[in-house]
Structures are given as C-alpha cells and as structure tokens.
C-alpha cells in the first residue's frame, strides 16, 4: 500500500514531537526509543508482561489498510501516542494537545456524565472501532462496563520504550474515577507481521 511509508513516518515524527519540549535525542536516551519493526500479538504480549503493563483490552488494527485509513484522519493524528476520550454518543472530546501527553490523568479522574465538554464530529468512536480488533488469541480481555459514559482509547507502541509507562499510567486514573462508567481500550500502533509489508513500505526513525 503506497500510503504506508507516509503513515509510519507520521508516527515516527509524532514520537519526536509528542507534545514534549524535548527532542528525539532525549527520547532515545530517556525512554529507550528504538527502530520500529514488525510485531506479532505474541511479541507484544511478552513486552507487556515483561514491563508489568496491562494485557487485557489490548487492540490492534485489523490490517494495513485500516491502519492507513485511521492514521490519515487529522483528529486521530492529534492524539497519537496519547489518549482520546469519546462520550456516550461516540463523539470525540477535545482537549489541549499542547499539554504534556500524560496530563490526562487528572482529566480522566474528573470525568462526570453530566458535564459539558467541547466535542468533535470528525472522528467517531464507531468509525474507529470498525478498523480495530482485540489481540488475536489473547484471552486476557477485561469485561467493559455496559453502556459506558465514556470510552478512553490510549495509543501506544513497543518502539517508544519506557515512555509507555506514561501512557499505561492512565489506567489508574480510570480506576480512581468513581462517578462515571469508563471503558478503556489500549490500541497498539506497531507494524504487524501479518500485514506482509514490503521493505519499501517500512521506514526507520533517523
């Protein structure tokens, strides 16, 4: 697929920018940023278990075409390697992407069903869910609350190393919210082996 190199490059650029004030060198040495490579659900589960990250509610894109469709959406790109919050109607709730990407903890803990939020129609939850699926073969799926007030989708990637600690910390914010029913989905952004990408379709972080 011709769009894949550009899409992967977008993610690589996002790792550098990432809403942080630092640079790529900082990411390499502070968080152990590595070259993106093809993964499988098994290698990702192994990575999650090794780092004591959640293995339940883990999702991946169904194929490279789905990956490309979603990452081309400018609203999705705004929240790469961060989190998105959708309300009960499946509308994306806007938040300040100039803040630190892990600043979402306080916001998630404060979510209430009757509060008013700025929303966006350009990315719908139902649209996004149509492009992703639970990790194939992963039996560790946590039952989500019925008719959730909010759905939080956190995007992460193995190649960003220990920066993932900042992202998976958002699970604590969800558990500490006692006023809203929140469904939490972890969405992986690594290239998948079963996508069968050619060498030209892969890029490196330079």
Image (spheres, helix red, strand yellow):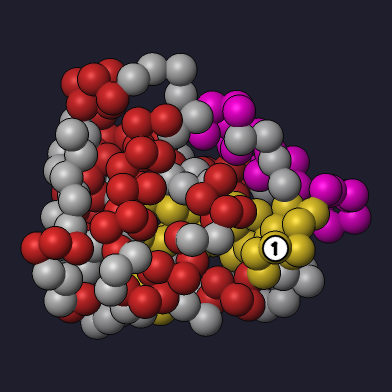
- Quadrant of the snapshot with the C terminus: top left
Which SS does the magenta portion mostly show? loop
Q: Is residue 114 visible?
A: yes
Give the quadrant of residue 138.
bottom left
So how many labels did they put on this image? 1
- Quadrant of the snapshot with the N terminus: bottom left
Give the quadrant of residue 40.
bottom left
For the residue carrying disc 1, how many other residues have a C-alpha within 10 Å: few (<14), some (14-19), or many (20+)? few
- Magenta stretch containing residue 103, yes or no? yes
Q: With respect to residue 102, does 203 lie above or below? A: below
Q: With respect to residue 53, does 66 lie above or below? A: below
Looking at the image, the residue that sits furthest to the left is: 199
Task: Name the spot of residue 135 as percent of width and height, x first.
Answer: 31, 74
In depth, the one of 189 and 104 nearer the eye is 189
Q: Which residue is mark 1?
A: 122
In depth, the one of 91 and 12 nearer the eye is 12
Looking at the image, the residue that sits furthest to the front is: 2
Q: Is residue 191 left or right of residue 98?
A: left
Task: Name the spot of residue 149 as percent of width and height, x first.
Answer: 75, 65
Please tell me which residue is depicted at 68% across the width and 34% down the height of the picture. 96
Q: Which residues are magenta?
A: 98-118
- Magenta stretch containing residue 188, yes or no? no
Please tell me which residue is depicted at 14% across the width and 61% down the height of the picture. 200
Q: Is residue 45 visible?
A: no
In depth, the one of 42 and 181 nearer the eye is 42
Please tell me which residue is depicted at 63% across the width and 70% down the height of the picture. 125
Give the quadrant of residue 60.
bottom left
Look at the numbered disc 1 and give the secondary structure of its residue: strand
Please tell me which residue is depicted at 79% across the width and 54% down the height of the picture. 119
Task: Name the spot of residue 141 as percent of width and height, x first.
Answer: 40, 74
In depth, the one of 86 and 140 nearer the eye is 86
């Amino acid at each position: 697929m011709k769009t894949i190199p550009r899409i992967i490059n977008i993610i690589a650029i996002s790792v550098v920018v990432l809403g942080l004030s630092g640079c790529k060198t900082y990411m390499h040495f502070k968080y152990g940023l590595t070259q993106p490579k093809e993964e499988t659900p098994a290698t990702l589960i192994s990575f999650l278990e090794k780092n004591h990250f959640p293995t339940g509610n883990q999702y991946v894109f169904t194929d490279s075409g789905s990956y490309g469709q979603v990452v081309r959406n400018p609203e999705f790109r705004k929240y790469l390697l961060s989190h998105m919050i959708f309300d009960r109607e499946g509308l994306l709730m806007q938040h300040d992407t100039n803040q630190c990407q892990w600043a979402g903890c306080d916001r998630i803990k404060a979510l209430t069903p009757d509060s008013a939020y700025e929303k966006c129609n350009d990315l719908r939850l139902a649209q996004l869910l149509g492009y992703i699926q639970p990790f194939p073969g992963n039996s560790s799926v946590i039952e989500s609350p019925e008719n959730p007030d909010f759905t939080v989708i956190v995007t992460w990637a193995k190649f960003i190393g220990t920066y993932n600690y900042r992202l998976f910390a958002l699970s604590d914010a969800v558990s500490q919210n006692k006023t809203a029913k929140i469904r939490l989905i972890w969405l992986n952004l690594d290239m998948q082996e079963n996508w069968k990408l050619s060498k030209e379709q892969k890029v490196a972080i330079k």
